[in-house]
Image (cartoon, rainbow, N blue to C red):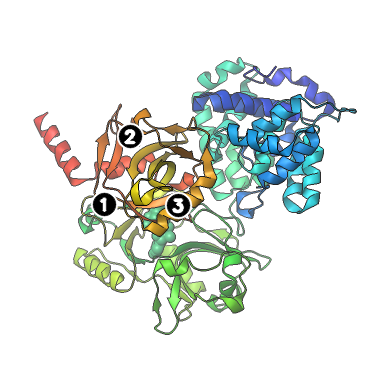
Amino acid sequence: DPSMDTYHPLKQAYWKDQGLTPYLALARTFQVIEETKGRLKMIDILSNFFCSVMMVTPNDLLPSVYLSINQLAPAYEGLELGVAETSLMKAIAKATGRNLAHIKSQTHLIGDLGIVAEQSRVSQRMMFRPKPLNIRGVFSKLREIAKISGQSKITLVYDVFVACRFSEARFFIRSLIGKLRIGIAEQSLLTALAVALVKKNHIKDCKISKVSDVYKDEIAETTLILKTTFCQCPNYDIIIPALLKYDIKELQTRCPMHPGMPLKPMLAQPTKGVHEVLERFSGMHITCEWKYDGERAQIHLNDSGEMSIFSRNSENNTEKYPDLIARSKAILKTNDIKSYIIDSEIVAWDLERGQILPFQVLTTRKRKNVDIATIKVQVCVYIFDLLYINGNSLVTKPLSERRKLLFEYFQEVEGEWKFANALNTNDMDEVQQFLEESIKGNCEGLMVKTLDEEATYEIAKRSRNWLKLKKDYLSNVGDSLDLVVIGGYKGKGRRTGIYGGYLLACYDAENEEYQSICKIGTGFTDEDLRAHSEFLSKHVLSGAKSYFRYDASLEPDAWFEPVQVWEVKCADLSLSPIHRAAIGIVDSDRGISLRFPRFIRIRDDKNAEHATDANQVAHMYQSQDQVKNNQKSANQMD
Ligand code: ATP
């Protein structure tokens, strides 16, 4: 029944007969989620499915989880499907006997090859009905498809496609394209798993539809454990078996961090000046480090001697820096270092002058299949933290201790490996002077960090224990924002034929939605505008997604998939009756918008979910002097 909105674990007994979960059960779950608006309801539906699998066919939980977020392996392994739409169209045409041109025009009209595939199935007649698909089978086929190329890829697609029933065709094709379009991302998935676990524990003493209300606290605690574990061990191949085998309270120790697996990095809070640093850290030991303007790099060495380099987004950048790997032995002071994880910033380096080059130079480096002999842009690594050494995690140790170990085990190599320039001081004149020096040294400013108290490495957190102090802050706004492009407006005059303006959004991680924050038309060169139009026109949607929040008056000429992040500066932030950024945080009905937004650059190192989030926008709004003063005088009047 495609309208059924929940799978009840105890009603799925027939799965057991075969020991396999039908793919159709998952496809129908997706179908219902796609038709659902509220996030909590979406999570509830997914959790019912996971709970069913946990109870009836637990061996299928891992492939079910991967299929729900459309991944084939841990994200950092970079195994991607992304089969070209035209190849898929050919496979669909062959399987359904429809004409290729018809499929193309339908796709253009509907804007979704998945739906076209599903509709095409209806007219198909088969001589022999293939066996129904199951989750494990589909998942392993997808993995195979990702790993091979050419015609055999399409043959495999065809084999699965002819066995698809009902909405299976829609989601199988969408998986292959790389976009499931059900709006389930990592955070919702982890919550759904937690809810499923609690449901499974209490299904005997409570109706399934009641579990979420009755066991709220247990769900909150389980969700937190799962999310925290995922930050140190972003690998379902490890987490899911542990989840099924051990008590949830043991999960974090059963899934420890280890080299080769990226940790979500600790992030910093913006400040507007030395006085704010002084206020926050009064009476605490602090250190100031130069804030290098390059690319964040988590550098790992594992026990087998393999090295990997991960970006701020946990993408595997190892292939991009073979030169660093080749010379990495030189930083080891002793032979007894078997494994480590260091946190650092890679910057472009001027070999002749012996100085740091601007960030833009670094972006010209090739990303894949880099051959050392052809590298033009040299780099230097500035190491600022040590998170793991010889089998031991250091994240719960204070920075002073981590730094001591860093200096004990590692050494600098001129122009190649350096420790971040640091000064331990609580004297604000010295901080100010160090800030000036950092700017002269081609840095963005300072990172000010706690040394002893409240000085652990907080995985995945934007922490108050790391403050960034930049020189070029506009007087009223602490920082630039990183925003997602969700819509485009057709240009006029010189901009005719391309998009002349865009609609930008921040990301609300709690609700997993994109909230409009401003329109932007300034800061672009003609070249930028042409390039943006060309890139974004490949990501046009047939309409707004359910997880875009905006006012109807902002309706753009085209909606885009949330695929690109732009760094934007503005004069200030104000409350807005039409924009929805951070709505409900500062004001119950109004969102926040940017005044005089200006495009700075594309942030290739961030994906849409790493854009500035709603809480940060609210924080930036509230820390503006004017807003603070108004609040003060309102309090005085009370
Ligand atoms: P976000 O705060 O969202 O990471 P961002 O990527 O724009 O934003 P900033 O907030 O400007 O980065 O600053 C934090 C980044 O600064 C770190 O992610 C790191 O890449 C870089 N960085 C440079 N020098 C240091 C340092 N000494 N300590 C920590 N981070 C540093």
Q: Is residue 389 above or below residue 613?
A: below
Quick one: 539 or 206, which is closer to the camera? 539
**Location of residue 379 with respect to 615 vertically, above or below:** below
Q: Residue at x 44, y 76 (%)?
A: 349
- Foreground pick, 356 / 503: 503
- Mark 3, ligand 1, within 8 Å: the answer is no
Residue drawn 67% across the image and 31% down it: 116
Q: Quadrant of the C terminus?
A: top left
Please name the residue shown 41% across and 51% down the image.
Answer: 566
- Amino acid type, residue under disc 3 in the picture: His
Q: Position of residue 181 (x, y in %)?
A: 58, 35
| Between discs 2 and 1, the one toward the N terminus | 1
> Is residue 335 toward the left or the right of residue 435 in the image?
right
Circle 3 or circle 1, nearest the eye: 3
> In what quadrant of the picture does the N terminus appear?
top right
Residue position for label 1: 280
Q: Image point 35% across, 66% down: which residue?
A: 289
Q: Amino acid at mark 2?
A: His
Regarding mark 2 in the picture, which secondary structure is present there? loop
| Mark in the foreground, 2 or 1 | 2
Q: Relative to residue 572, is residue 191 depicted above or below?
A: above
Amino acid type, mark 1: Arg
* Tag 2 residue: 579
Q: Mark 2 CB in 8 Å range of ligand 1?
A: no
Q: Which residue is mark 3?
A: 532
Q: Residue 417 vs residue 390: left or right?
A: left
Mark 3–mark 1 Cα distance, whole angstroms, equals: 40 Å
Q: Which of the marked residues, 2 or 3, is nearer the chain's N terminus?
A: 3
